[in-house]
Amino acid sequence: MTHQNKIGFNDTQIYMTGDSAGGELYAACGLTDNKHQIRHLFPMYAAIDITDTSKTIYHWQYSDYDMDPTDEPFIHARLNKFIYVNNVIRLLYPGIENVENPLISPVYSHDFSKFLDITIIEAEFNYYLQSMPKNYVRPVKM
């Protein structure tokens, strides 16, 4: 931060938020913030894993979600949309075969021990909920 004194900027109080790809970007920023300049992250519906569903490190399935049978068609349509969107997002990385790079799909980072404080905002039936490793998040029940 070159001119932080001139603008009254305190680099120890940076809070970041972003939605979808922006949430993924800020998660990647958190992984690379070795100087601990970011204080807290608030990614919303972050695209933290864009690998093909058949290649993920976790086993995604509809039964992972608690659904009322009358709502299943709507929830399945919502979850299937995420799979389609992942396929489209991967097109943004032409020539990159390994989308498991943690800066592209942060869920594949191996070390979260120095990761800063993070509050992740996800919907109840969000596809990415199943991808979050236990050392990445702690669910909060409302």
Image: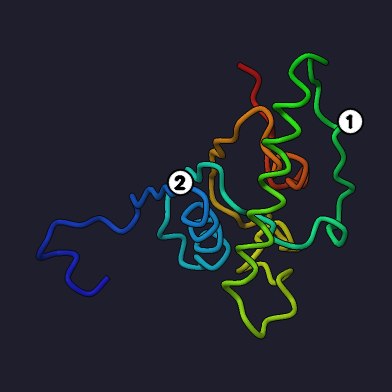
As rendered, which of 64 and 8 lies closer to the eye?
64
| Up-down relation of residue 100 to residue 84 (above or below) | below
CA neighbours of label 2 inside 10 A, class few (<14), some (14 to 19), many (20+): some
Q: Going by the image, does 129 lie left or right of 118?
A: right
Amino acid marked by disc 2: His
Tell me, for residue 55, which label it has, or none.
Answer: none
The x and y percentages for residue 89 are: 60, 63
As rendered, which of 95 and 135 lies closer to the eye?
95
Q: Which residue is mark 1?
A: 63
Q: Residue at x 19, y 65 (%)?
A: 4
Q: Residue at x 69, y 47 (%)?
A: 136
In which quadrant of the rendered view does residue 101 lie? bottom right
Tell me, for residue 40, which label it has, or none.
Answer: 2
> Element at badge 2?
strand
Q: Going by the image, does 107 lie left or right of 116?
A: right
- Give the mark nearest the N terminus, 1 or 2: 2
Q: Residue at x 45, y 46 (%)?
A: 40
Q: Going by the image, does 30 lie left or right of 38?
A: right
CA neighbours of label 1 inside 10 A, class few (<14), some (14 to 19), many (20+): few
> Element at badge 1?
helix
What distance separates the C-alpha of mark 1 from that of mark 2? 33 Å
In which quadrant of the rendered view does residue 48 lie? bottom right
Quadrant location, the C terminus: top right
Amino acid marked by disc 1: Ser
As rendered, which of 52 and 84 lies closer to the eye?
84
